[in-house]
Image (cartoon, rainbow, N blue to C red):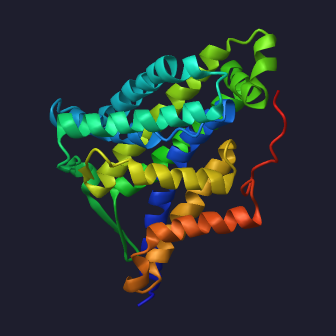
Amino acid sequence: MLTPAYIAQQFINALNMGSIYALVAIGLTVVYGILRLINFAHGDMMTLGAYLGLAVLTALALPAWAALLIPMLVVGALGVLIERLAYRPLRGAPEVAMLITSLAISSLIQNGATMTLTAQPRPVRLPAELTQRVDVLGVNFAVMDVVIVGLAVALMIALTLFVQRTTLGIAMRACSENVRVTQLMGVDVNRVIAVAFAISAGLAAVAGVLWSGKFGLVDPFTGFVPGLKAFVAAVIGGIGNIPGAMLGGYLLGFAEVFFVAFTPPEVSGYRDAFVFVLLLVVLLVRPTGLLGAREVNRA
Protein backbone atom coordinates (compact mmCIF):
# COMPACT_ATOMS: atom_id res chain seq x y z
CA MET A 1 0.00 0.00 0.00
CA LEU A 2 1.44 3.36 -1.08
CA THR A 3 1.10 5.36 2.11
CA PRO A 4 2.80 8.75 2.57
CA ALA A 5 5.12 7.16 5.15
CA TYR A 6 6.14 4.44 2.67
CA ILE A 7 6.85 6.99 -0.06
CA ALA A 8 8.87 9.13 2.37
CA GLN A 9 10.83 6.03 3.41
CA GLN A 10 11.71 5.27 -0.21
CA PHE A 11 12.70 8.90 -0.71
CA ILE A 12 15.23 8.56 2.14
CA ASN A 13 16.54 5.30 0.66
CA ALA A 14 16.92 6.98 -2.73
CA LEU A 15 18.80 9.90 -1.18
CA ASN A 16 21.21 7.43 0.40
CA MET A 17 21.84 5.49 -2.80
CA GLY A 18 22.08 8.65 -4.88
CA SER A 19 24.59 10.20 -2.47
CA ILE A 20 26.92 7.19 -2.71
CA TYR A 21 26.57 6.93 -6.49
CA ALA A 22 27.28 10.65 -6.79
CA LEU A 23 30.49 10.39 -4.73
CA VAL A 24 31.81 7.53 -6.87
CA ALA A 25 30.69 9.17 -10.12
CA ILE A 26 32.48 12.41 -9.21
CA GLY A 27 35.69 10.47 -8.60
CA LEU A 28 35.37 8.86 -12.02
CA THR A 29 34.66 12.11 -13.79
CA VAL A 30 37.54 14.04 -12.13
CA VAL A 31 40.06 11.65 -13.72
CA TYR A 32 38.18 11.31 -16.99
CA GLY A 33 37.99 15.07 -17.40
CA ILE A 34 41.80 15.32 -17.54
CA LEU A 35 43.03 12.05 -19.06
CA ARG A 36 39.92 10.81 -20.87
CA LEU A 37 40.44 7.60 -18.87
CA ILE A 38 37.50 5.43 -17.84
CA ASN A 39 39.08 3.95 -14.71
CA PHE A 40 37.49 0.53 -14.24
CA ALA A 41 39.60 0.02 -11.11
CA HIS A 42 37.68 2.86 -9.45
CA GLY A 43 35.08 0.54 -7.90
CA ASP A 44 37.88 -1.49 -6.36
CA MET A 45 39.03 1.63 -4.52
CA MET A 46 35.61 1.42 -2.86
CA THR A 47 36.38 -2.16 -1.83
CA LEU A 48 39.74 -1.21 -0.34
CA GLY A 49 38.15 1.69 1.52
CA ALA A 50 35.47 -0.62 2.93
CA TYR A 51 38.05 -3.14 4.18
CA LEU A 52 40.18 -0.40 5.73
CA GLY A 53 37.13 1.08 7.41
CA LEU A 54 36.30 -2.36 8.83
CA ALA A 55 39.86 -2.75 10.11
CA VAL A 56 39.77 0.66 11.77
CA LEU A 57 36.49 -0.11 13.53
CA THR A 58 37.36 -3.64 14.64
CA ALA A 59 41.11 -4.32 14.79
CA LEU A 60 42.12 -0.80 15.82
CA ALA A 61 38.89 0.00 17.70
CA LEU A 62 39.05 3.64 16.66
CA PRO A 63 36.00 5.97 16.48
CA ALA A 64 33.74 6.19 13.45
CA TRP A 65 35.29 9.41 12.10
CA ALA A 66 38.66 7.63 11.88
CA ALA A 67 37.01 4.86 9.86
CA LEU A 68 36.26 7.52 7.24
CA LEU A 69 39.40 9.65 7.44
CA ILE A 70 42.04 6.90 7.46
CA PRO A 71 40.67 4.99 4.42
CA MET A 72 40.28 8.27 2.54
CA LEU A 73 43.93 9.21 3.14
CA VAL A 74 45.40 5.72 2.60
CA VAL A 75 43.41 4.90 -0.53
CA GLY A 76 43.99 8.42 -1.85
CA ALA A 77 47.75 7.84 -1.49
CA LEU A 78 47.35 4.46 -3.20
CA GLY A 79 45.57 6.19 -6.08
CA VAL A 80 48.58 8.50 -6.51
CA LEU A 81 50.92 5.49 -6.45
CA ILE A 82 48.89 3.63 -9.08
CA GLU A 83 48.87 6.71 -11.30
CA ARG A 84 52.63 7.05 -10.97
CA LEU A 85 53.47 3.40 -11.64
CA ALA A 86 50.73 2.26 -14.02
CA TYR A 87 49.20 5.21 -15.84
CA ARG A 88 51.91 7.86 -16.14
CA PRO A 89 54.25 5.67 -18.26
CA LEU A 90 51.36 5.16 -20.71
CA ARG A 91 50.53 8.84 -21.05
CA GLY A 92 50.59 9.71 -24.73
CA ALA A 93 49.85 6.10 -25.73
CA PRO A 94 46.49 5.21 -27.29
CA GLU A 95 43.67 5.66 -24.78
CA VAL A 96 42.79 1.95 -25.03
CA ALA A 97 46.17 1.12 -23.41
CA MET A 98 45.23 2.90 -20.18
CA LEU A 99 41.74 1.41 -20.35
CA ILE A 100 43.18 -2.12 -20.49
CA THR A 101 45.59 -1.22 -17.69
CA SER A 102 42.69 -0.13 -15.49
CA LEU A 103 41.01 -3.49 -16.10
CA ALA A 104 44.25 -5.25 -15.14
CA ILE A 105 44.53 -3.23 -11.92
CA SER A 106 40.91 -4.03 -11.09
CA SER A 107 41.53 -7.74 -11.58
CA LEU A 108 44.73 -7.54 -9.51
CA ILE A 109 42.94 -5.89 -6.58
CA GLN A 110 39.97 -8.26 -6.70
CA ASN A 111 42.10 -11.41 -6.89
CA GLY A 112 44.60 -10.10 -4.35
CA ALA A 113 41.79 -9.39 -1.87
CA THR A 114 40.26 -12.82 -2.53
CA MET A 115 43.58 -14.62 -1.89
CA THR A 116 44.56 -12.63 1.20
CA LEU A 117 41.19 -11.90 2.80
CA THR A 118 39.16 -14.80 1.30
CA ALA A 119 35.95 -14.37 -0.67
CA GLN A 120 33.83 -14.82 2.46
CA PRO A 121 31.73 -11.70 3.13
CA ARG A 122 32.63 -10.05 6.41
CA PRO A 123 30.05 -8.33 8.61
CA VAL A 124 30.45 -4.63 9.29
CA ARG A 125 29.19 -3.61 12.72
CA LEU A 126 28.77 0.10 13.18
CA PRO A 127 28.90 1.91 16.53
CA ALA A 128 25.56 1.92 18.33
CA GLU A 129 25.09 5.67 17.87
CA LEU A 130 25.02 5.20 14.08
CA THR A 131 22.59 2.27 14.06
CA GLN A 132 20.11 4.01 16.35
CA ARG A 133 16.71 4.35 14.68
CA VAL A 134 14.77 7.60 14.61
CA ASP A 135 11.04 7.95 13.93
CA VAL A 136 9.81 11.22 12.43
CA LEU A 137 6.12 11.47 11.46
CA GLY A 138 5.93 7.73 10.90
CA VAL A 139 9.13 7.59 8.83
CA ASN A 140 11.77 5.37 10.40
CA PHE A 141 15.43 5.75 9.52
CA ALA A 142 18.85 5.20 11.05
CA VAL A 143 21.30 7.90 12.09
CA MET A 144 23.63 6.36 9.49
CA ASP A 145 21.21 7.46 6.75
CA VAL A 146 21.60 11.08 7.83
CA VAL A 147 25.37 10.70 8.02
CA ILE A 148 25.55 9.31 4.46
CA VAL A 149 23.57 12.17 2.93
CA GLY A 150 25.19 14.88 5.06
CA LEU A 151 28.74 13.68 4.48
CA ALA A 152 28.22 13.22 0.75
CA VAL A 153 26.78 16.71 0.35
CA ALA A 154 29.59 18.21 2.46
CA LEU A 155 32.26 16.49 0.35
CA MET A 156 30.62 17.60 -2.88
CA ILE A 157 30.44 21.20 -1.69
CA ALA A 158 34.08 21.05 -0.55
CA LEU A 159 35.18 19.66 -3.92
CA THR A 160 33.20 22.29 -5.80
CA LEU A 161 34.82 25.08 -3.77
CA PHE A 162 38.24 23.49 -4.25
CA VAL A 163 37.85 23.33 -8.03
CA GLN A 164 36.42 26.84 -8.34
CA ARG A 165 38.39 28.82 -5.72
CA THR A 166 41.89 27.31 -5.41
CA THR A 167 44.89 27.62 -7.72
CA LEU A 168 45.24 23.85 -7.96
CA GLY A 169 41.55 23.48 -8.70
CA ILE A 170 41.76 26.05 -11.49
CA ALA A 171 44.76 24.13 -12.86
CA MET A 172 42.64 20.96 -12.88
CA ARG A 173 39.94 22.76 -14.85
CA ALA A 174 42.56 24.05 -17.27
CA CYS A 175 43.96 20.55 -17.76
CA SER A 176 40.46 19.27 -18.48
CA GLU A 177 40.25 21.80 -21.31
CA ASN A 178 43.70 21.14 -22.81
CA VAL A 179 46.58 19.41 -21.06
CA ARG A 180 49.24 20.47 -23.57
CA VAL A 181 48.40 24.15 -23.48
CA THR A 182 48.20 24.08 -19.68
CA GLN A 183 51.67 22.52 -19.54
CA LEU A 184 53.05 25.18 -21.90
CA MET A 185 51.73 27.80 -19.48
CA GLY A 186 54.08 26.44 -16.80
CA VAL A 187 51.64 24.31 -14.82
CA ASP A 188 53.04 21.11 -13.31
CA VAL A 189 50.64 18.74 -15.06
CA ASN A 190 52.00 15.67 -13.26
CA ARG A 191 51.16 17.23 -9.91
CA VAL A 192 47.67 18.18 -11.06
CA ILE A 193 46.95 14.67 -12.33
CA ALA A 194 48.31 13.12 -9.11
CA VAL A 195 45.96 15.31 -7.07
CA ALA A 196 43.06 14.30 -9.32
CA PHE A 197 43.80 10.62 -8.67
CA ALA A 198 44.11 11.26 -4.92
CA ILE A 199 40.72 13.00 -4.86
CA SER A 200 39.16 10.29 -7.02
CA ALA A 201 40.44 7.39 -4.92
CA GLY A 202 39.71 9.19 -1.64
CA LEU A 203 36.07 9.80 -2.57
CA ALA A 204 35.73 6.16 -3.66
CA ALA A 205 37.13 5.02 -0.30
CA VAL A 206 34.61 7.12 1.62
CA ALA A 207 31.82 5.77 -0.58
CA GLY A 208 33.03 2.23 0.14
CA VAL A 209 32.92 2.79 3.89
CA LEU A 210 29.42 4.27 3.64
CA TRP A 211 28.21 1.47 1.36
CA SER A 212 29.52 -1.33 3.60
CA GLY A 213 28.18 0.45 6.66
CA LYS A 214 24.72 0.78 5.15
CA PHE A 215 24.47 -2.83 3.95
CA GLY A 216 26.54 -4.38 6.74
CA LEU A 217 28.85 -6.52 4.59
CA VAL A 218 32.10 -6.28 2.67
CA ASP A 219 33.75 -8.74 0.28
CA PRO A 220 36.41 -8.50 -2.48
CA PHE A 221 33.76 -7.53 -5.05
CA THR A 222 31.88 -4.99 -2.94
CA GLY A 223 32.72 -2.07 -5.23
CA PHE A 224 32.31 -3.80 -8.59
CA VAL A 225 28.59 -3.26 -9.23
CA PRO A 226 28.40 0.19 -7.52
CA GLY A 227 31.41 1.21 -9.62
CA LEU A 228 29.64 0.21 -12.83
CA LYS A 229 26.49 2.01 -11.77
CA ALA A 230 28.48 5.11 -10.87
CA PHE A 231 29.94 5.01 -14.37
CA VAL A 232 26.38 4.90 -15.70
CA ALA A 233 25.53 7.88 -13.47
CA ALA A 234 28.53 9.83 -14.77
CA VAL A 235 27.55 9.14 -18.38
CA ILE A 236 23.93 10.09 -17.74
CA GLY A 237 24.98 13.40 -16.19
CA GLY A 238 27.70 14.07 -18.77
CA ILE A 239 31.01 12.35 -18.04
CA GLY A 240 33.82 14.81 -17.40
CA ASN A 241 31.36 17.26 -15.84
CA ILE A 242 31.36 17.37 -12.01
CA PRO A 243 27.85 18.87 -11.59
CA GLY A 244 26.68 16.34 -14.17
CA ALA A 245 28.15 13.49 -12.11
CA MET A 246 26.30 14.76 -9.03
CA LEU A 247 23.04 15.02 -10.97
CA GLY A 248 23.50 11.63 -12.59
CA GLY A 249 24.24 9.97 -9.25
CA TYR A 250 21.08 11.25 -7.63
CA LEU A 251 18.92 10.59 -10.68
CA LEU A 252 20.18 7.02 -10.83
CA GLY A 253 19.68 6.51 -7.10
CA PHE A 254 16.09 7.73 -7.24
CA ALA A 255 15.31 5.80 -10.42
CA GLU A 256 16.69 2.53 -9.05
CA VAL A 257 15.06 2.75 -5.62
CA PHE A 258 11.70 3.85 -6.99
CA PHE A 259 11.81 1.10 -9.62
CA VAL A 260 12.21 -1.50 -6.88
CA ALA A 261 9.72 0.15 -4.52
CA PHE A 262 6.88 0.75 -6.96
CA THR A 263 7.00 -2.26 -9.27
CA PRO A 264 5.86 -5.86 -8.62
CA PRO A 265 8.45 -8.23 -7.09
CA GLU A 266 8.72 -10.26 -10.29
CA VAL A 267 9.79 -7.08 -12.11
CA SER A 268 11.84 -5.31 -9.43
CA GLY A 269 14.40 -8.12 -9.49
CA TYR A 270 15.67 -6.68 -12.77
CA ARG A 271 16.93 -3.50 -11.11
CA ASP A 272 20.43 -3.82 -12.59
CA ALA A 273 19.04 -4.35 -16.09
CA PHE A 274 16.82 -1.30 -15.59
CA VAL A 275 19.88 0.82 -14.80
CA PHE A 276 21.55 -0.01 -18.11
CA VAL A 277 18.32 0.37 -20.06
CA LEU A 278 18.03 3.84 -18.55
CA LEU A 279 21.58 4.56 -19.76
CA LEU A 280 20.68 3.50 -23.31
CA VAL A 281 17.59 5.71 -23.30
CA VAL A 282 19.55 8.76 -22.12
CA LEU A 283 22.29 8.17 -24.73
CA LEU A 284 19.71 7.85 -27.49
CA VAL A 285 18.07 11.12 -26.50
CA ARG A 286 21.20 13.04 -25.48
CA PRO A 287 24.49 11.27 -26.36
CA THR A 288 26.66 13.70 -24.37
CA GLY A 289 24.62 13.29 -21.16
CA LEU A 290 22.25 15.72 -19.49
CA LEU A 291 24.88 18.38 -18.68
CA GLY A 292 27.63 17.24 -21.04
CA ALA A 293 29.03 19.42 -23.81
CA ARG A 294 29.97 18.23 -27.25
CA GLU A 295 33.56 17.02 -27.36
CA VAL A 296 35.98 19.42 -29.04
CA ASN A 297 39.47 18.89 -30.39
CA ARG A 298 41.93 19.20 -27.49
CA ALA A 299 45.11 18.93 -29.54
Q: Position of residue 232 (x, y in %)?
A: 57, 55
Q: Position of residue 44 (x, y in %)?
A: 39, 40
Q: Position of residue 97 (x, y in %)?
A: 57, 31
Q: Which one is nearer the viewer's eye here, 162 or 181?
A: 181
Q: Which one is nearer the viewer's eye here, 250 or 79?
A: 79
Give the answer, above or below, for where 116 lies relative to 168. Answer: below
Give the answer, above or below, for where 52 lies relative to 149. Answer: above
Q: Quadrant of residue 137?
A: bottom left
Q: Which one is nearer the viewer's eye here, 205 or 289?
A: 289
Q: Quadrant of residue 174?
A: top right
Residue 254 visible? The answer is no
Residue at image position (64%, 65%) is 280
Task: Say which quadrant the C terminus sits in.
Answer: top right
Q: Quadrant of residue 138?
A: bottom left
Residue at image position (51%, 57%) is 18
Residue at image position (22%, 46%) is 127
Residue at image position (30%, 50%) is 213
Q: Position of residue 17 (x, y in %)?
A: 46, 59
| Residue 158 located left or right of residue 135 | right
